[in-house]
Image: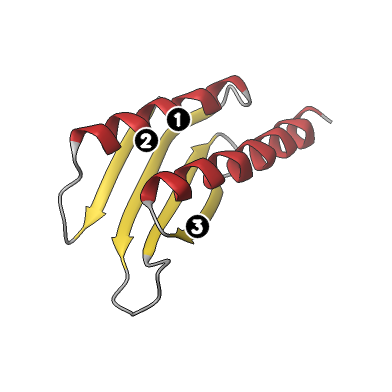
Amino acid sequence: MDIRINPVGFSVNPVLEEFINKKFSKLEKYHDGIMSIDVTLKLEKDDHLENKLTEVHVDVKGQDVFAKKNAKTFEETVDELYDVLKRQLVKAKEKREN
């Protein structure tokens, strides 16, 4: 499984990159058809405190999964998206098996 991290307008520090890779690599245990994961990180230009946006596209055999989240930190978005994507992948796997 390939995890691609795409920051928009800034560089990702190695600590955040490692955090993202470790977190999303765990998704493989919920669906064996994951081919790749694209993670897009954006800083939104507004005065809102939750200006960190993370979008994740999971390329799964038969059905792709997508989610996005805003929060104060990228780590917070990744944690929340992991839970959302885990549920979506479990549903997709159950749907495929039935």
Q: Which mark is residue 63?
A: none
Badges 1 and 2: C-beta atoms under 8 Å apart? yes
Whether residues under marks 2 and 3 lie with C-beta atoms below 8 angstroms apart, the answer is no
Q: In the rendered structure, which amino acid carries the disc numbered 2?
A: Ile
List x then y, in percent, for residue 4. Answer: 30, 38
Q: Which residue is mark 3?
A: 68
> Which residue is pictured at 56% across the width and 26% down the height?
33
Write down the quadrant of residue 46 in the picture.
bottom left
Mark 3: few/some/many CA within 10 Å (<14, 14-19, 20+): some
Which residue is labeled 1 in the image?
23
Residue 52 location (% of width, % of height)? 37, 61
Q: Is 36 or 62 nearer to us in this picture?
A: 36
Element class at badge 1? helix
Instruction: Identify the coloring.
Output: secondary structure
The residue to which callout 2 is attached is 20
**71 or 94: nearer the eye?**
71
Q: Quadrant of residue 44?
A: bottom left
Mark 1 surroundings: few (<14), some (14-19) or many (≥20) residues within 10 A: some
